[in-house]
Amino acid sequence: MKKTIINAIGTGVFLSAAFSLQAHAETLTISCGAVGAELELCKEGVKAWAEKTGNEVKVVSTPNSSSERLALYQQLLAAGSQDIDIFQIDVVWPGMLGQYFVDLKPFSNGAEKDHFESIVNNNTVDGKLVAMPWFTDAGVLYYRKDLLEKYNQQPPETWEQLEASAKLVQEGERKAGNDKMWGFVWQGRAYEGLTCNATEWVASFNGGTVVDENGKITINNPQAAKALNTAAGWVGTISPQGVTNYAEEESRGVFQSGNAVFMRNWPYAWSLSQAEDSAIKGKVGVVALPKGGEDGRHSATLGGWQLAVSKYAKNPKLSADLVMYLTSYEEQKRRAIKASYNPTINALYKDKEVLAATPFFGSLYETFVSGVPRPSSVTKSKYNQVSTAFFNAVHSVVSGKEKAEASLAQLEGQLRRFARNGKWK
Amino acid sequence: MSQSSRQRQRARSAWLFLAPMICTLLLVAGWPLLRTIWFSFTDASLSDLNAAEFIGWGNYLYKEDGEWYGLLADAVWWKSVWNTLTFTLISVSLELVLGMIVALALNVNFAGRGLVRAAVLIPWAIPTIVSAKMWSWMLHDQFGILNDMLMGVGLISAPLAWTADADLSMVAVIMVDVWKTTPFMALLMLAALQMLPKDCYEAAKVDGIHPVRVFFRVTLPLIMPAVLVAVVFRALDALRIFDLIYVLTSNSEDTMSMSVFARQQLVDFQDVGYGSAASTALFLVIALLTLAYLYLGRKHMRVGD
């Protein structure tokens, strides 16, 4: 049974790379995501490097769903496969997959010092730099400039202000005839995205990060419970009941059709909201997510993707060279301007051309730098279990099945199961 | 040559003929099964199977600081057991009743019967992974045809999230499974109906007995063995259900079956030890039910003799 399951997923996904034994030119294989413009951008960047160095690079596109992608990578790597030299990995995977990757420090010439420190730390496992940051992501708050102006409201600083503004505008607009209007949409489906949303709420109320950097399980605290109960209060009042089944695209659908005042989402939604066919073109503002009360803090979950070199790569040195090229200043700048992928290099947030393409890269610089990491480095191979347990616990609170206090106490017990004898491995 | 030595020789050659098959079975079924059972007593991880250490019953049940841990103390596992049993009971019952109705209808002589028989089999012929994906689009809350039709006739006022809503997702899974496997049940029962002797029916007709009574007193007892085989086959299949549920609702705890749970542990969580424990438990459940069926069948036969 186990065998068949593993084989069923693993087979038929790739054709292995050809062993072309040309005299000088090497052939590398890289896996790239294929969401939106990703694959096209990746191919362009890779081609430029291949022409520059005279080597050949094969680009393999992988499943869009990150959990499917992870399962596939895990099987390839566990089997010691040489099919792929360079992996595009999610920000929460270094802890899980780090053991399979080459330390890039010898090849980077200190380039990582120009990148966001939080991401570099996230990609450093047991002192090894297992992946280079490629692009970053952070949760931000989108709002309707026109509607806030109409009702004389400011962009919210705290969740309480957001609730008040959302209620006011929602009721006013419904009276004015739009009975589909909602105050706030976000991602409440039981999946990794809810982990991201809930991590932001908890951190904004100073409730920690589920598991702290020393591996201690900290989620069962009053501030975290307060954060989740606050979020549960939105459902059915300023957020539709259906929000507990929304992922990114469902919430964007509601916001972009003009039926929501506020939306929590990733930066990718910006260029789409400004597209020609968008109902809200030119009416959108972006700010950092609200604080949990006056002494809370603005927080955004750290997302984004990295490039790592497999320790089974046929030519680690050359593979690392390609990684360094793709994550370089010029290449990140090209990607930022062309498709508004967030750079991971500090200096690019002051680059005039980049800022002209996406203005909030400048105003939200602090948000992108100080993203809250999910507890993936510390929980290592157990991160997936921790995240699944966390989003299921949060989901039962926001869908009204139980109160946060009870749910978090239960979650703590569950998390203790994953860390046998208090050790994450 | 005496009677008994000839019998012995025949038994020997029978074993000889069976040997290749038994070896093959041991290789392809026995070895993986034993390996899975072995892994269930270790803390193996998918990232390094060789580093597995023996931990005894640690994956099944152990006590630490006065708290029980392990599979048998895992609420999610019991939820998946419960889901699987619910699913099996409801879907197999529905398939039995509907399959019987379809079989009785197809048993009547009418023009174009062969064509209808072939058409009925289509849901069974489509690979599950394909029909599940197809249904998942039809059940989609935003642009599924099912919500569109229901709203069209005014049965619902807002679209329903068939595959995501905690209360509806099991209903959706059972509905699709019934659609898919009713033809299989119908076919098995139709085969039994075709074998029935005509004379009982003629006698019943002469005596003027009501058709409903004839069905329960004559038809049903005669086709009972075939019905039982069909039900047991379906039940064993339903207990192992994986593909349909995984495609429709992914890893959601509301519909998670035992197989889905095992896969999540093995693949998503890399926990080969724990996942193997779940697989072994699933194997035990099915093995016990099969043994119970065989035992009851034998007893029944003896009573029949």
Image (cartoon, rainbow, N blue to C red):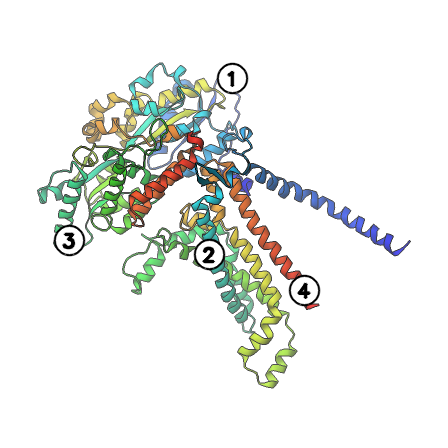
Q: Which mark is residue A174?
A: 3
Label 3, residues with CA under 10 Å away: few <14, some 14-19, many ≥20: few
Q: Secondary structure at mark 2?
A: helix
Q: CA distance from mark 4 to mark 2?
A: 30 Å
Look at label 1 and name its amino acid.
Answer: Ala
Which residue was labeled with disc 4? Answer: B301
User: Do callouts 1 and 2 mark residues in contact (Cβ within 8 Å)?
Assistant: no
Q: Secondary structure at mark 1?
A: loop
Q: CA distance from mark 3 to mark 1?
A: 71 Å
The chain holding disc 2 is B
Q: Residue at x 62, y 43 (%)?
A: B29
Q: Split into 4 quadrants, where in the image is the C terminus of chain B?
A: bottom right
Point out the frontmost of discs 3 and 4.
Answer: 4
Q: Residue at x 36, y 40 (%)?
A: A411
The chain holding disc 4 is B
Which residue was labeled with disc 1? Answer: A23
Q: Which x, y percent locates residue A59?
A: 43, 30
The residue lying furthest to the bottom in this view is B207
Look at label 3 and name its amino acid.
Answer: Arg
Q: CA distance from mark 3 to mark 4?
A: 72 Å
Vertical arrangement, residue A6 with respect to residue B128, above or below: above
Callout 3 and callout 1 share a chain = yes
Q: Which x, y percent locates residue A113?
A: 31, 17
Label 4, residues with CA under 10 Å away: few <14, some 14-19, many ≥20: few
User: Do callouts 3 and 4 mark residues in contact (Cβ within 8 Å)?
Assistant: no
**Foreground residue among A256 and A394:** A394
Q: Secondary structure at mark 4?
A: helix
Which residue was labeled with disc 2? Answer: B86
